[in-house]
Image (cartoon, rainbow, N blue to C red):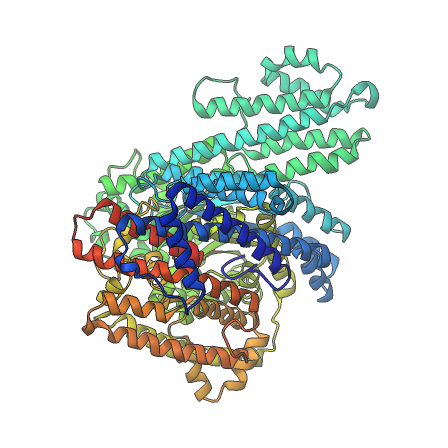
Amino acid sequence: MGEGTGAPGAAGLAELREDLQVLSDLLSETIRRQEGDEVADLVEVVQAAAQDDARPTPDLARIALPTANRLVRALVRYFHLANVAEQVHRGRVLTATRHREGGPLQRALARIEAAGIELPELQRAAGDLAATPVFTAHPTEAARRSTLLKLQRIGEQLPQVSGSPEARRRVAELVDLLWQTDELRLERPEVLDEARNALYFLDDIYDGPLSRVLDDFAGTLRERGVRLPATARPLSFGSWIGGDRDGNPFVTPAVTGDVLAVQRGHAIDRILELVEGLVEDLSVSERLTGVPVTLREELERDFAVVAEIEPRYLRLNAEEPIRLKLSVIRARLLASRVRDNAVAHSRPGAAYRNTGELLADLESVRNALLENRGSLAARGRVDSVIRQVSAMTLQLASLDIREHSQKHHHALAQLIDRVQPDAPGYASLTRAQRMDLLADELAQLRPLSASPPELDEAGATTFGALLTARRAIEAYGPEACRSYIVSMTQGPDDLLAAVILGREAGLVDLSRDKALVDFVPLLETATELRTAGVILDELLSDDGYRQLVRLRGDTQEVMLGYSDSNKDAGITTSQWEIHLAQRRLRDVAAGHGVRLRLFHGRGGTVGRGGGPTYEAIMSQPYGVLDGEIKVTEQGEVISDKYLLPELARENLELTLAATLEASTVHRRPMATPDRLARWDEVMNLVSERAFAHYRSLVEDPELPSYFMRSTPVNELAGMHMGSRPAKRPDTSSGLDGLRAIPWVFGWTQSRQIVPGWFGVGTGLAAARAAGYADDLAEMTTSWPFFANFVSNVQMTLAKTDLAVAERYVTELVPHDLRACFDVIVDEHARTVTELLLLTGSDSLLGDQPGLAQTLAVRDQYLRPLHLLQVALLQRVRAEGDELPSQLRRTLSLTINGIATGLRNTG
């Protein structure tokens, strides 16, 4: 569930209003008790004025800074509590829907059956299913873990408040503690801190929702005659935190190694808990059931390797061979932890080398039960544990490593120029010459350097990350790191450079059929998206690279960048070029007999590819999805999706259901070739005109100054949000060097939200003027891609508030720069008009009145925060570089509060 999904509907709104009132009252009581009547009265006056335009609003710009700080804190905490109330309500609605209509998987299977998909095809698709949410950190992530923990506990207690004075007392206590918790970090988090925060969410997911989803998935399929092995991995997790090196100097090879070790230790501890549960449950006596010969033989071999457990457990569990086998598993897990920590040396072979060995031992337990009248336990409790371990692995989440393409060329130039001193310098080669050289080099099947290469500091760091990946895979197993992502891939040579460097680090050795990771091109701008098919075709046409892909299971992963393509080309062209790129990649991969795994680098906001999960998956071109998919889960929206168990369950099940449905029903076109060609013709025109208008805005020489003045993006640097810098190093000081995330962040804070809709109106109006009005209407109702696009843009427009934006412009932007705002206002009006014509509604979100009402209420409380932020920005910019700490903190709080109120930052 992304932005705009699962918002309150008509049903149960009375309960939501009651919860909001309870939390608002408790917050008011806290403020009055802890801050006094003056602050409490001011908060109430501001909130009352926000709800009633007829009431006078205090002059917020003249409020003393200490009082302003408390007022902002009150509004921020209100939004935190309102978000929890809405999440609880969404959980109620989802539970009611599940009881009434079944869960997402049941509904998807009904549609699959209605489409005539037969059992063998469903069996194949279910067996191939591999959906991977990938957790990423976020440089503008605003919420602290200390805050999230309290909000989670409030959400757990809130449903009981109305009927339990004790529950109300506990919530009141938590609200008190929430008020006494600083919203802002004292310092920027380190990468390891961000990794531990991700573990917190993974813990919650593994604690209940994941096992429930996997068990339900297997059970629901079994009812329809589909058998899914317990060792199948329809759902698993990945992470970028500690592996995303692109533009983050704090992700060193040593940090990557530390994060991998932390994940490993955490996974072993969690699996030990599962094994202890089995030990407690499986008190099966051989005196009563017998013991399979195979298990007894296994135990003899086990005791030879893990001899230290035999005396104790043979005495305690002499007639309980299954418990003895579980004791072996426990001992091997402990040996793995000891080996990983390098505290002591266990007997060779005792530690697990990979998750496959652990699963084989658990399968032995399962088979022993099946052979001795224990089928219920085998197919129940034991299968459930096997499913969890298969998903979790001994690494908890596979760590992707990402590096900028130019970093590999920089390191490789030093190696190649050293062994070919008489040839033209590597850096002087054209892209085609570089490709020829690298292809020849890959075909040589031997490293460039017989010893560790001599590289400068930058090259050594890049090479060090590859070495760290190889060592982790050798120590922890293949699940430690599966994907090495090359950002800003502009040609096949960019990927081959990474492969050659990977060969030097021992990740690749084609002479020994060794390929330890997938090398993944990341296509990030409109230009690269347009040439996606050409890039992939050239790669797969190279014999050496094709051998590498064959060694990786004949699967090629390609990552699509939504954020940078949006910043580069605008939302319309970004979305359309990504759609077309998927078609091209699908056709090229099929032509080479390769399976395509797409990795969608989607952000939380619509301007960065965000939106509802189910609709996003189902709106892909036909035939693109064949069981495997990866999708980023940005740090800023992870809490919204996974904070409460029912929401986590729904999000995971939606991902599975949509992937299964798209892999079956959507293998063939949903429309005739003539209709698809006509829709393409319309969309090409819409994209072309939208792109031209968007580029005219971003290429306006006044826009950088306008953007910096009308938004708080410059002040973002003063907030200790994420470990990653907002700007890429070694880039210009203008908009080009600014990352896509703070680009969206700035526009969102000032409520202009340009990346989410600008250019759409111009494109649609051009198509309508060209006689495509009927086609646009048909596309809205019959083409999932276009319907999803329109829905997401409509959501962004509903969050855009140009009346608020005008205050930023009037107070902060010089007159000679305000023409940019006039262009934005004009395009906004055009886009709203076009969207209403498409949807046939009188207002935005006219078909979702509950959501529209929720956003309207939020707007009322957001306006005071915006007014305070504008006033504070004026003071900050007047002060210069030496800012009083309280002024900086109060401004940072408004940024935090607006992000919380809008439920995203960038």
The residue positioned 53% from the left and 34% from the top of the image is 394
Q: Is residue 506 visible?
A: no
Residue 64: % across, % down: 26, 52
Residue 253: % across, % down: 34, 37
| Occupied quadrant, residue 607 | bottom left
Is 351 on the left or on the right of 871, as rendered? right
Q: Is residue 266 above or below residue 13?
A: above
The residue positioned 21% from the left and 46% from the top of the image is 884
The residue positioned 35% from the left and 56% from the top of the image is 741
User: In the rendered image, which quarter contains the C terminus?
Assistant: bottom left
Residue 649: % across, % down: 61, 48
Q: Is residue 695 visible?
A: yes
User: In the rendered image, which quarter contains the N terminus?
Assistant: bottom right
- Work out whether residue 787 or residue 296 is closer to the camera in this orientation and state it: 787
Q: Is residue 276 above or below residue 666?
A: above
Count how many numbered circles sit on residues in the image: 0
| Occupied quadrant, residue 302 | top right
Is 350 on the left or on the right of 370, as rendered? left
Residue 389: % across, % down: 60, 36
